Amino acid sequence: MISITLKPKLSELYHLNEFILNRLSDENLQVNLIVEEIFVNIVNYSKTEFITVNVDYSNQTLTLEFIDNGIEFNPLLKEDPTLPDNIDEAQIGGLGIFLTKEMADELYYHYKDGKNHLKIIKKVE
């Protein structure tokens, strides 16, 4: 497992994506979306001082663990949004956690020693 610690700034997303994608054999759009949604939510809402991401890739399974010292928030308890009937009724925003839940193979959350820990497991080829 390797780790990267970033400042809670949207500009750091580029470094995080590069760090993760260098571990994968091919670019994976679902992984990109998951990483972006979780990182942006932490930056925008947590009031954290740092974001550490642990990355492990083995046997075509990617494990990401996001750790921050921001406001305690368990995204697994967030109620799924009501989806629009058609694209014309869709609104921007509010689907990041829902999409992450849908795309990940496993999700785990715990809060320990003043830190949020969100673990995401995703099978990748």
Image (spheres, grey):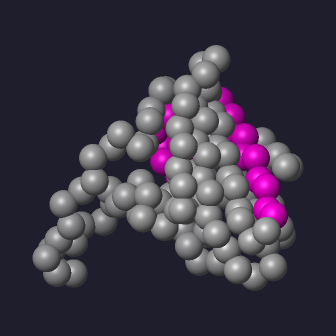
Residue lying at 43% horizontally and 42% vertically, measured from the top left = 75
Q: Nearer the viewer, residue 7 or 59?
A: 59
State the residue at coordinates (21%, 67%): 83
Q: Where residue 44 appears, x then y in whole percent?
A: 48, 44
> 125 or 20, which lies in front?
125
Residue shown at 41% from the left, 54% from the top: 97
**Residue extending farthest front:** 59
- Location of residue 114 by image quarter: top right
* Above or below: residue 39 compared with residue 23: above
Question: In this picture, which residue range is highlighted in magenta?
Answer: 40-58
- Residue 43 magenta-highlighted: yes
Q: Is residue 49 left or right of residue 57?
A: left
Q: Residue at x 21, y 81 (%)?
A: 87
Picture coordinates of residue 24, whole percent (x, y): 79, 73
Determine the image quadrant of residue 16. Answer: bottom right
> From this viewpoint, which residue is outermost toward the top?
113
Q: Is residue 108 above or below residue 16?
A: above
